[in-house]
Image (tube, rainbow, N blue to C red):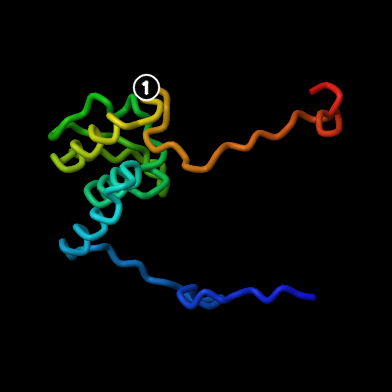
Amino acid sequence: MPLNRLRNSNHPKAGSTTKVEPIRDLSAIAAIKKNLSARPRDLCLFTLGINTAYRANELLSIRVGQVAHLSAGDTLDLMQSKNQRHRMITLNGTAASAIQDWLKLHPAPEDHAALFPSRCPVRLRPASGDEGDAAGQ
């Protein structure tokens, strides 16, 4: 019996494009921040995104050591994924305080650790040839 997949009404049809606009309404931003307040990692990620205009993958590439010492007025320089150029931004007070608030709760605040660790557990594959070796466990 074939599976009937449910169609997401928000998903664009094949071949069409979707235009994404920035969130400009301050009340909408405040509502999103309120919804994210119970998830400090996501709140910091959102706050940095709207205050720096960095892309998601650029934000996810940030390491704790790059930002642990930063405060308002300091600069953050990241390589853009789009064109492989460096882009420097000056952190405003909102972005700097979001980083410092998140670092107080960060599960592993070592310099080399990702600022935004994945919420999904890492699955390790067994080494080649170990799949069928139950006796060695």
Q: Nearer the viewer, residue 23 or 8?
A: 8
**Residue found at x 55% / y 39%:** 121
39 or 77: nearer the viewer? 39
Tell me the kind of residue under disc 1. Asp
Question: Where in the figure is residue 27, as x and y percent of width and height?
Answer: 16, 63
The answer to whether 26 appears left or right of 61 in the picture is left
Task: Please state the horizontal and vertical placement of residue 59, each as a whole percent of the image.
Answer: 36, 42
Query: For the point 23% across and 32% down, which residue is it?
Result: 100
In this rendering, the count of numbered labels is: 1
Q: Nearer the viewer, residue 93 or 28?
A: 28
Label 1 sits on residue = 111
Identified at 23% across, 39% down, the residue is 98
Question: Residue 31 at what x, y percent from top left?
Answer: 22, 60
- Say above or below: 47 vs 100: below
**Mark 1 residue crowding within 10 angstroms, few (<14) / some (14–19) / many (20+):** few
Residue at horizontal 25 percent and vertical 47 percent from the top: 47
Q: Is residue 129 left or right of residue 29?
A: right
Label 1: element kind: loop
**Residue 122: percent from the left, percent from the top?**
58, 37
Q: Quadrant of the N terminus?
A: bottom right
Quadrant housing the C terminus: top right
Task: Classify residue 77 by image quadrant.
Answer: top left
